[in-house]
Image: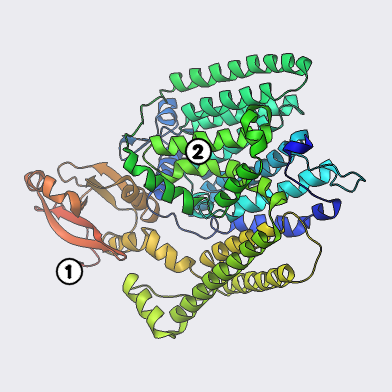
Amino acid sequence: MNHLTPAIVAQSAVRRLPRLALLLLCVAYVLLGFWGRAPWKAQDIEAFGYMLQLAQPGMSEAISWLKPTLLDNPDSNLALLPYWLGALSIQWAPKGLEDVFARLPFIAMLSATLAATWYAVYSLTRHPAAQPVAFAFGGEAKPADYARAMADGGLLALLACLGLARLSHETTPALSQLCFAALLFFGLSTWARHRIQSAVAVSVGMLGLTLSGAPTLALWLGIGGTVICATAQPDPAQRRLSMLDVGLLALICLLCVTTAGALDLWRWRVVPHSMFDLHLLGKLIVWFTWPAWPLALWALWRWRGQLSHVWRYPHLGLPLWFALVTIGATWFTGLSDRALLSSLPAIATLAALALPTLKRSLGALIDWFTLLFFSFCALAMWVVWVAMQTGIPAKPARNVARLAPEFVPEFSIGAFVLAVSATLAWAALVRWRTGYHRAAIWKSMVLPAGGAVLCWLLLTTLWLPLLNYARSYAALVQKITRITDQNACFQYAGISKAQGAALLHHGQARLMPMQAPQPDCQWLIIDRANLSLLSAKIRALGWVEHAAIKRPTDNDETLVMFRPANPLNLPPTRSEEPVR
């Protein structure tokens, strides 16, 4: 294998990344972004709305759980499992903490994604063809130590990916698909060494993907991955055993197909594209998977000696297959970054394979680029935060006031301490990386991962009140409840699912489709964008406009409120003046 292996690694280069530091990095990344955040528009609050509806006391019938609805519309993603998990968590939540408890299963899924990626890289790099060159007089890296160092590098590469931060902290089916794709990837990567745990992981991964709205993706990934694992066995006896494994996979696939058919999860979702749209896919991949994609391409080039028979080498074939299938799914489903999210564990694995082949000059270039980029981003976030708190510098303060009118900055000592601690940790990391120390193959991923976690942490501490104000519907619903009070009843027409979910969550409202004014439901709410289509019906039913409420950070989003033209024992409102 040596002539096919470009990795030349000494034992001194595979020293262990401190476990406590790695654990703290992962904990900070996972928790910050879930904790203390309002549901953001649009998919985040929409998915939360489905969970709220399922968790209502009157929604215990089986048909409601098999056909989640919001505003009397079914879920277009055909995702059941993430809504079930969120709804079950909400049912255990104290009043007022529903959104916090709904995130608990998603915190677990993101944690499982990180763990599955680490163990997948560890198992794949234990393959003989992935091991470094054996030295003539010894001293090459030991297999277990080498695999552990590579797994550390793969996990750091995943944390560094720009596209992972926001989407992996939302309560949407995209995170569920990422988690189960990572579990499937892990199960297939350990197929040759741990049959039972692999079968369990593959089964959970494929069924989870099926129930998360991606049954076709589950079949493509599972079938192709099993073929690669079966053909990679060098021993004919093991290859015969792999045929039994293929039979087991066939049963799992049959179960997935049956489940998807019984729950009516199959849909034709192919979106046609022209070849001119390839540049859009390229742009999405470039920013979404940065900085893993350049390293992944470098790994394919450096390991090109094995690409001609890639199906024999699961450390290359398996992540390459997962990356190609998920990128293909992104292309055929409308160039959605949410579809591309599931490719990140595989691309991070390929990026890890580049680490033992990097030249010192290329590693230094990565270090200096990430050092300057993330340091500049962190400095900009601090400057804007200081401007929000003090008004100095004046230009950033004016920009915030222009983009988020009526926003009142608030100071949190806890968030400030976390932000300062993270910034000091970044400075210490930079000092360590630029100092003299023994080389480690994961060193080139330390600054990208640390910088990505730093910026995400600053966003979710210093900027969190601003982001909640700008990206959630809380401010809009607060303006509405100043007129109607909490727990009001609204008839609705022409509003989005996200807007309806915001009224349910932030306003504790009751919603019913538009009809004539009712004694117990004398408010009508409509999105102004659809008002012209409904104006004749509104007048015919006896409604007159009362107020138009703009979303503070989006002038194109306005909800129009109506009252009955002939009052039906109307309760007093807090303000009879139209709010515009």
Q: Is residue 426 left or right of residue 386?
A: right
> Which quadrant holds residue 271?
top left
| Above or below: residue 391 compared with residue 463 | below
Element type where label 1 sits in the image:
loop
Question: Quarter of the image containing the C terminus?
Answer: bottom left
Question: What's the residue type where badge 1 is placed?
Answer: Glu
Nearest to N terminus: mark 1 or mark 2:
2
> Residue 394 in the image: x percent, y percent?
39, 85
Dot 1, how many residues are within 10 Å of its Cα: few (below 14), some (14-19), or many (20+)? few
Question: What's the residue type where badge 2 is placed?
Answer: Pro
Give residue 191's mark: none
Dot 2, how many residues are within 10 Å of its Cα: few (below 14), some (14-19), or many (20+)? many
Can residue 570 be spotted in the picture?
Answer: no
Element type where label 2 sits in the image:
helix
Measure the alpha-carbon separation of dots 1 and 2: 43 Å
Q: Is residue 442 left or right of residue 296?
A: right
> Residue 427 in the image: x percent, y percent?
67, 73
- Seen from the viewer's position, the closer of residues 307 and 267 is 307
**Residue marked by disc 1:** 577
**Residue marked by disc 2:** 82
